[in-house]
Image: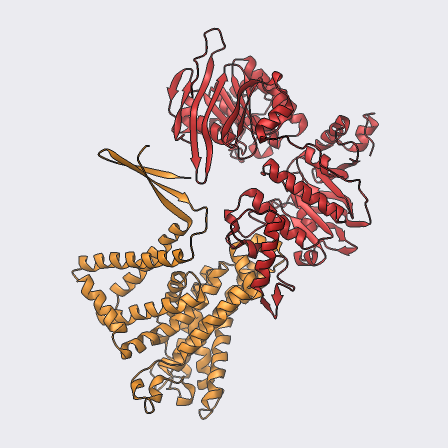
Chain colours: A orange, B red
Amino acid sequence: MAESTVVKKGRASFKIRVEPRLNEPPAWYPAAVSFGALIVALILGGILISLAGGDPIRSYLHIAKASFGDSGVLSDTIVKATPIILAALACSVAFRMKLWNIGAEGQFIMGAFGASAIVLAPVLPAETPRIIFIPVMMMAGMAAGALWGFIPGYLKAKFNVNEIISTLMLNYVAVAWVNFWIFGVWTEGGFQMSPKFPATASLPRLLEYAEAFPILRGLTTHLGLVIGVVAAVILWFIIFRSRWGYEIRLIGDNPHAAQYAGINITQNIIWVMMLSGALAGLGGMSEVAGVVHRLQTAPVAAGYGFTGIIVAWLAKLNPLVIIVASILFGALILAGREIQPSGVPKMIQGIILVCLIASDFLLRYRIVVERGEE
Amino acid sequence: MTKQPSSATEIPLIVEMRGIVKRFPGVLANDHVNFELKRGEIHGLLGENGAGKSTLMNVLAGLYRQEAGTILVKGEPKVFSSPRDAIKSGIGMVHQHFMLVPSQTVTENILLGLDEPRFIMRLPDYDSKIAELGERFGLKVDPRAKIWQLSVGEQQRVEILKMLYRGVDVLIMDEPTAVLAPQEIEGLFITLRAMIAQGKSVIFISHKLQEVSAIADRVSVLRKGVATASGVASKGVSRQELARLMVGRDVIFALDKKPGKPGDVVLDVRDIYAENDKGLPALRGLSLNVRAGEIVGVAGVAGNGQSELSQVISGMRECKQGQVLLGGDTVSNRTTLFGIQHGMAYVPEDRTHVGSAPNLSITDNVIMKQYRKPPILKNGLLDMKAATKLATELKQAYDIVVPNVSTPVRLLSGGNLQRVILAREISGLPSFMVAVQPTRGLDVGAIEGVHRLLLTQREAGAAVLLVSEELEELLSLSDRVYVIYEGKIMGEVMVEGREQDEALVDTIGQMMTGTPLDQIQNEGVAAHG
């Protein structure tokens, strides 16, 4: 229904109407709208910063410098972005099927646990070569994450248990579970962390090649970035080119039509939740093996799974766009620590999400301004 | 727009609408429409689906606000900003979809929204008042009955009573016969005549010619938002003329149907039982069969188990008892996929909620049943080039009017969407097709296209089960017709050569209201299958 507002200004009167779009907007339009929403969010954030007594322009410049200013901080930004990429991919595939998995956080933590167990149990001895160690840890991380996705998936498929509640609750279980192991079993001299991983169980970092290429000195970007990018490309293929991805898109858009097309929805709920969990779990693995180098709750359960939700929406669930959006958020997190331990950066994230969701309206409706006669 | 004021000797106009314009995004629903209603007449408002009839009347009933034009009631200009305003001016509307509270009684529903009773609900007083009012207009309904206990016809009477209780002089009925059985339609007509005898006026919206010429004193016709006839006396105009005014060209009443050559039984439904969504019995021992190369119709008033029948056949609903055989294989209680892989096509009743994925492209929608096999599936991946090629071919072959096949189907019109669905179902070369209400909501041109496609299927040797509420459609397409009533088959009649037979229509009409065929024959009514 068309709502209209008449604005009268002297003699000139014009009408603003909102109409549903009847034609597909051009391809550049969604990207432009998202970009516009981002700008609006930054402006709103700027207003709030100035109300809080800050200088928005200086704050933003500082954010930009602190995250993209030189190769060192750029590398740090990418390190922050890496777990977000995988967490956001995890969310995107579930959201694509309208499964509201907000348990990427827990699946991420379980992935970190699964990968760590290979080192700490130990499944593989410390002197195992990297080329074996790392793939095994990846598998273990994915398996643990997939298990953490399977539980709510199965409950949803068989008993129609609301996945929002079950995935959310399992986040806490995951933290408690990891705490149990690092407090009680794998504790390092009573501290709440496991012993440090051997070098063979860590992802290669750029700084390791600094002898050959001095320019890489001090850069902590690790193999996790490559894992994230490859995962994004594979996920893109799964969603848009594979038979399974077609089924996921069909169920996501209209489950009745999917059922009508002969697709088994319950099975797909379980599989998609497991894929989602596995991706998040891979993120957890990448974080312990690439950054933390030991199992510890605080740096792993740092909210990447929740940031992933925002990033997945920011990227409109497109796996390739997620890479870009994650880097933006990595920058925000990094710069946030520079400005203030918490508060403003979280607020900016929140404002960005609200603006993006609101901007979706412009993709479905268009605003018509009519001049002249009533 | 230039309209002479009616002379004093004529019957006074009770409603006059002048130059009404109402726009919706992408459509001009009413384009300077004039409409006049005299006191004490039944005024038929004819037009195809989407011609703007309901829009015009929604403007009159205060639901929509016109963008231009004026409404005069008893000569005074009025501006309605809500249905309440319209009712105050004596204009009430009975919508196609009833607005009643199922768990409350008739009286409670009628009083709902009124200022009385104030504090103490003395319902028995009102019960008798409402019973009295009902009697005056031949609307028999128990004021103490709960709405859910009532048939659709009775619920309609409650809606009418609701308006009469509010003292309206003008009653707008939007497609009132769509939900009624033939016998109930007769009852409605008696009520409407009783109302005009007591000085009320009725606007009767319909797209059914014969009904309008049977009941209306005068007729107005809308086509694509424009009035093509205003207030013509219905006696002086033939059905053919009205049809031309509605569609702008001659309607082909008879399709070119070649004599049938039925082959082996393809679909065999044996004594099936099933429940509806509420867990109540919907199919109660239903049997029928369809042979290759024939179209078999299922006639009946909506809600007698047609939807459940098609769902059991397609594997989307559990079959409690009995079985459905397709080419000798049991398909009931198997997966939907089993049916698809055994040559079953299904054109579902609900195009947007079941038959298509609205935000996916035409390409994605046409491969819905073919993505599991080559050429769409190649090396485990979807070959999007092959899919686009298929979609483009179907777009041309089935006359789907869109700029390109990457358009999401939610942007398609009803007719185009139905062509997408039919294109998909037919391109799978089915041996059996069940089509439920395939032409509902489509304009005449689109209906004709759908009919031709179904006949082509028949000639190609497919077995087609056509479920429809349109008797004319069933008679012009089917070789045989089964009549369904409360989940049971009341009887089966052969159609060939009797498409225009009034006795056949009468027999089907009686079966639709629950008289089995053998009883009708015992009473000596001419009808033999």
Tell me where residue A126 appears, x and y as whole percent. Answer: 44, 91
Q: Residue furthest bottom?
A: A127
Tell me where residue A193 appears, x and y as whole percent. Answer: 36, 81
Left or right placement of residue B259 versus residue B308 in this view: right
Front position in the image: A254 or B110 = A254
User: In the picture shown, does residue B194 fall above or below B412?
Assistant: above
Figure quadrant of residue A113? bottom left
User: In the picture shown, does residue A340 fall above or below B316?
Assistant: below
Q: Quadrant of the N terminus of chain B?
A: top left
Tell me where residue B27 appears, x and y as whole percent. Answer: 46, 37
Left or right placement of residue A310 versus residue B159 in this view: left
Q: Residue furthest top?
A: B9
Q: Residue at x 47, y 80 (%)?
A: A138
Figure quadrant of residue B308? top right
User: How many numbered circles does the render carry?
Assistant: 0
Please say whether residue A151 is visible from this viewpoint: no
Q: Quadrant of the C terminus of chain B?
A: top right
Left or right placement of residue A197 versus residue B160 in this view: left
Please say whether residue B487 is visible from this viewpoint: yes
Tell me where residue A283 appears, x and y as whole percent. Answer: 42, 74
